[in-house]
Image (cartoon, coloured by chain):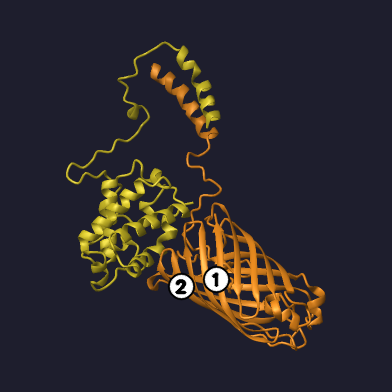
């Protein structure tokens, strides 16, 4: 890394010799062609490219009956578990980088919808499919394992019975090929 | 504009940085990313698995991007014998496992009765390799288990004695094919292993004999139930050939509890029954095994 910095400093040398100019008013995002995304004032979410909404995007067939929804404390319980999972992930040094510069508002909503839908707790999943929603995140098997451990912790803290935890994980485990990129 | 001159300078330097800099999240060789207990424990032959059976698991705590290691020590207290084994394994990219184990089998008073001398110890080295062909114990379709092929080369260090008791050879090689799957919907892990072997008492009494010289197909089955992510209870059954004319050999079975004290340390306690050994029947007792894995 220091090697690279030295290179960068060397390469940038001519700049210091060029005539000084005031760069404070420069719109760097425009100069570099960065597309600005504007937060939706109602939902607080950033826009995503258009996609077809389909509950099948959740990637698993939901449970039937209300036993799983009850084990997770209904929609309120699921929302708490999902929020806790997101909090754990953004604080987890193993995988925190993956969540940086991501729309966590949208993540909390779609993840809640997905778990709620799979547990048959009365939701429809409106998010993208697992392959699209994880595109270019560069996630590894170890990242996925770290997330699973955080989900287990969130479920344990919510006192979801261990067998019910595993029944949810059984629905999520086959998605690994779509969420692990490298 | 001047901005363009600035960009023309800074952009190549950024490019240089991208070329020269390692990725910010360069993977450490030992990231310990495997889920706890999915590396199995060290079987008595050194390969990762249950206590008695070799599973399709790959040793060490690394995933498909790292190289993991593990080491173990195991003690078994049987009715008339004492067993001690230890060894180490390397798991390469969750694909290939290389392992070594040393088994020391203390005949205690039986040694005198057999004319070997009290406390005579049979010793054996086991060099093993395993490759995961397909599947994952935890992830993917529940219909596709993790499947591995293994080879275990065993060398008895008591060639003269094992030949005297009727073994055809003091060296032998087992071939294994294993399928392992954690059925999360039931919290149950199942393993099935087919083994081609002509080992007598795992090879401690040599290989082949008057009854049967060649390898025969044997079966190892394990079922385990997850109580928590770190606590598993289960049982195993292993069929074995009975090659020697002078002493019957029985199937072996055990009941075990494995506890991952930390991510890197697992302790296993078991009740193991290996039946008749060197004409002394009813050899059953307690097993304790400690494994460290990274």
Label 1 crowd bin: few (<14), some (14–19), many (20+), radius 10 Å: many
Residue B141 image-quadrant placement: bottom left
Q: Colour of chain A?
A: yellow
Of B110 and B59, the residue lying toward us: B110
Give the Cα separation between the discs numbered 1 and 2.
11 Å
Residue at horizontal 26%, vertical 73%? A64
Q: Is residue A57 visible from the viewing direction of this image?
A: no
Q: Secondary structure at mark 1?
A: loop
Residue B25 placement (x, y as % from top left): 48, 42
Query: Mark 1 or mark 2, which has the lower sequence index?
Result: 1
Residue A83 placement (x, y as % from top left): 27, 52
Chain seen in orange: B
User: Is B145 left, or right, of A82 in this rendering?
Assistant: right
Residue at horizontal 52%, vertical 68%? B268
- Tell me the residue that label 1 is attached to: B50
Residue B47 image-quadrant placement: bottom right
Of A107 and B270, the residue lying toward us: B270
- Tell me the residue that label 2 is attached to: B233
Residue B2 image-quadrant placement: top left
Instruction: Report in which chain the residue with disc 1 lies.
Output: B
């Amino acid at each position: 890394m220091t090697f690279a910095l030295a290179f960068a400093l060397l390469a940038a040398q001519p700049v210091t010799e060029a005539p000084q100019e005031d760069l404070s008013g420069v719109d760097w995002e425009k100069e570099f062609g960065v597309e600005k995304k504007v937060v939706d004032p109602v939902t607080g979410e950033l826009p995503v490219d258009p996609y077809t909404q389909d509950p099948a995007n959740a990637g698993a067939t939901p449970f039937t009956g209300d036993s799983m929804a009850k084990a997770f404390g209904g929609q309120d319980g699921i929302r708490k578990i999902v929020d806790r999972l997101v909090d754990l992930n953004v604080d987890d040094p193993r995988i925190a980088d993956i969540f940086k510069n991501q729309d966590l508002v949208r993540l909390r909503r779609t993840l809640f919808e997905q778990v709620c839908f799979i547990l048959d707790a009365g939701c429809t999943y409106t998010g993208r499919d697992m392959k699209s929603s994880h595109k270019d995140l560069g996630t590894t098997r170890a990242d996925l394992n770290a997330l699973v451990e955080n989900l287990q912790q969130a479920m344990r803290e919510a006192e979801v019975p261990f067998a019910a935890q595993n029944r949810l994980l059984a629905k999520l485990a086959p998605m690994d090929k779509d969420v692990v990129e490298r | 504009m001047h901005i363009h001159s600035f960009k023309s300078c800074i952009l190549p330097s950024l490019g240089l940085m991208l070329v020269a800099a390692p990725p910010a999240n360069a993977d450490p060789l030992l990231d310990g990313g495997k889920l706890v207990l999915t590396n199995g424990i060290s079987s008595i032959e050194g390969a990762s698995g249950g206590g008695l059976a070799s599973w399709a698991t790959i040793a060490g705590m690394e995933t498909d991007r790292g190289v993991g290691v593990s080491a173990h020590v195991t003690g078994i207290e049987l009715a008339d014998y004492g067993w001690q084994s230890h060894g180490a394994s390397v798991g390469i990219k969750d694909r290939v496992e290389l392992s070594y184990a040393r088994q020391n089998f203390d005949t205690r008073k039986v040694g005198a009765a057999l004319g070997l001398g009290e406390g005579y110890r049979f010793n054996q080295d086991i060099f093993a390799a395993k490759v995961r062909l397909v599947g994952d114990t935890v992830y993917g379709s529940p219909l596709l288990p993790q499947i591995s092929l293994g080879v275990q080369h065993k060398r008895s260090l008591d060639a003269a004695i094992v030949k005297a008791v009727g073994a055809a050879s003091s060296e032998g090689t087992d071939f294994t094919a294993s399928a392992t799957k954690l059925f999360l919907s039931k919290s149950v892990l199942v393993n099935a292993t087919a083994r081609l072997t002509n080992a007598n008492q795992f090879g401690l009494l040599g290989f082949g004999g008057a009854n049967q010289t060649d390898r025969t197909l044997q079966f190892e089955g394990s079922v385990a139930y997850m109580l928590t992510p770190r606590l598993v209870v289960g049982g195993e059954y292993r069929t074995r050939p009975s090659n020697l004319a002078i002493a019957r050999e029985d199937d072996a079975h055990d009941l075990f509890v494995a506890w991952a004290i930390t991510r890197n340390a697992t302790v296993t306690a078991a009740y193991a029954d290996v039946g008749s050994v060197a004409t002394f029947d009813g050899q059953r007792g307690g097993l304790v095994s400690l494994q460290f894995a990274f």
